[in-house]
Image: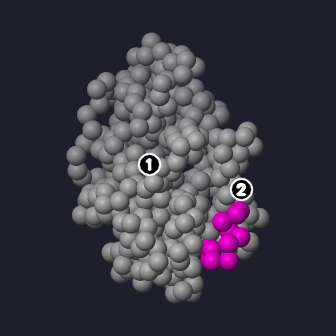
Amino acid sequence: MKIVHITTYAPNRCGLYEASRDMMKADTIFGGHEVYTVDGGGSNGNETFEGQISQTDDRNGFKITTVHPDILMDADIVIMHTGINDRWLVKTQAPVICVVHGKPLDCFRPEEKGNGGSYSLYEYIAQWPRTKKMLYFWDTYYDYWRHLFFKKDLVLKYPVIDCDRFQPTGETYQFTNKGDYNIVICDSIREDINMFETAIACLKIAREVKGVKFHFFAVEEPIKHCWETIFNSLRELGALGDVYGRVTNMDHIYRAADLIMCPNRIVNRVVGEAMLCGCPVMQETGALTQIANYYTYYPAPDNVLEIFLKFKQDHDNGLIYRDKISERAKGYFSMEEYSKVMNQIYLEIV
């Protein structure tokens, strides 16, 4: 089949793009389809801009080149990761699968506050007769989305991730301010996670454990004063490592880290990518955290410290087996398994 993915072209800069790239790779290599990539463009305030054409992303043995939106006229299936100007969509009546990359609360809360309208937009897209499926990951969100999607839900339990890129061997990041225990926090701040509680837990650990360094990535820039106070407190305790905004090649960082602390209650890409690289993950207890290595309740710093000490003991005793962590993770994020499910869906809707 000829499948056209509409996405936001932003290699190494956007989680939505990286997720769509992995889905395109699965469709191509394991699905056996003819796959095309259209950059949907976007907006910057009141200014809109067209998508890029003939841009190439060639990484880890898989190459993507963005093409002109006219390709939509020949599509058998359109997969929308993001929107595109209506003048292109009206040129085709190919069935649409809309991929809901946003999380329910992270879509709802900004709209409630008058900032954007992605929550209502998903409902609008689901009403299109040509929209056959509203695809999202994490079945724990089913009750949060089902009232919007007119029984078009397509729920996959885990995201699909490129296991060739995220693996234990490969280039490794060199921490500028390295410790005996290098802990990475790299989730973007969103409405549906509590990064503040995670930071307070870091302070609790830093007061009790010598040699620990907390490295923060994907920090919003410029750094707000409230966050500076927390970073300064960690610095005074000798526990502040590297602090950066968005960076490229997160696989290098996962290989260098001793532990990822993730405030998400779902198995998001941070969890999956880190574990595929062999890095253990500490995650908030929740319905879908049952593949992580250490579970805790982030609102309770004492509990976080208790679980961290368990990690420290395992680390000191050589009981963290990175190859085994990676192999176990492959069973959850397989492109091949994803393709088997999607190929059946494609046959049903064409």
CA neighbours of label 2 inside 10 A, class few (<14), some (14 to 19), many (20+): some
On residue 68, which mark appears? none
Report whether 97 appears left or right of 217.
right
Question: For residue 130: magenta?
Answer: yes
Residue at image location 36% in from the left, 51% down from the top: 11
Q: In this view, does 168 lie above or below 96?
A: above
Instruction: Look at the image and tell me in which quarter the C terminus lies.
Output: bottom right
Camera-side residue: 192 or 281?
A: 192
Instruction: Look at the image and tell me in which quarter the N terminus lies.
Output: bottom left
* Quarter residue 116 falls in: top right
Q: Which segment is the magenta one?
A: 123-133
Horizontal and vertical percent position of residue 7: 46, 60
Residue at image location 57% in from the left, 46% down from the top: 264
Q: What element carries label 2?
A: helix
Q: What element carries label 1?
A: loop
* Quarter residue 68 falls in: bottom left
Foreground mark, 1 or 2?
Answer: 2
